[in-house]
Image (spheres, rainbow, N blue to C red):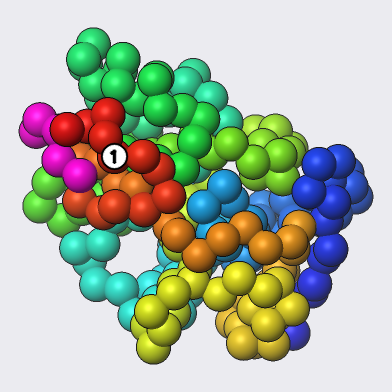
Amino acid sequence: MAKYLDVHPVNPQPRAIAEAVRVLRSGGLIVYPTDSCFALGAMMGEQRALERIREIRKLDHRHHFTLVCADFAQLGQLVNIGNAAFRLVKSCTPGPYTFILPATKEVPRRLLHAKKHTVGVRIPKHTVVQALLSELGEPLLSSTLLLPDQEEPLTDGWTIKEELDHVVDIVLDSGDCGTEPTTVVDLSDGVEVVRVGAGDVSRFE
């Protein structure tokens, strides 16, 4: 059964954050809030956790996974980013945007888009996520918590716990964080908005 942790949205309890990170480091899978909606999170190198995300969301190998970063120092280790793309990403972060860029060798091949060798990266503006990343000390493999039979992500932490009780290990809940996933922008070959979400898309027009 999944463990439910009620976390303060502004001052997340260190004990709860430490428990979530302990589970992550042991290969577990968590649900956590972001600045767009709830997401599934795991360690970047944990293949079994990745397979669990694929099973929960019924994803194929064309899906772009996202690596959630604390700052640009982490992001720059994971993707190759030119000057123009750097300025664009910098102007939008932290915030509810995911950027698709060519991955560096630091990213496991199984996380890459099968043909493009790209990966999604983002820097969220959310206190609980930043606390998680600070305690973890590395990027978090992430995927929007959008179940295959539903049109919108789940918004209530306790409902998520009941729905996914036997397929995730921890549900971190700091209150409703919305139903809109991130806006996704592909910067691997020009600028293409591939999903309109919580972030303003006018700056990419």
**In x, y percent, where is residue 170?**
72, 68
Report the predominant secondary structure element of the magenta stretch. loop
Count all numbered tags in the image, as a single digit. 1
Residue 191 belongs to magenta span: yes
Is residue 76 placed above or below 118 in the rendered structure? above
Please state, as top left, top right, bottom left or bottom right, where the C terminus lies in the image.
top left
Looking at the rendered structure, the kind of residue marked 1 is Val
Element assignment for label 1 = loop
**In x, y percent, where is residue 81?**
26, 21
Residue 158 belongs to magenta span: no
Give the class, few, some or many, for how many residues have Cα within 10 Å of label 1's Cα (few <14, many ≥20): some
Magenta part of the protein: which range? 189-193
Is residue 26 placed above or below 102 in the rendered structure? below
**Can residue 146 be seen from the camera position used here?**
yes
Please state, as top left, top right, bottom left or bottom right, where the N terminus lies in the image.
bottom right
- Lateral position of residue 173 relative to residue 69, left or right: right
Name the residue located 41 percent from the left edge and 84 percent from the top edge: 150
**In x, y percent, where is residue 27?**
61, 61
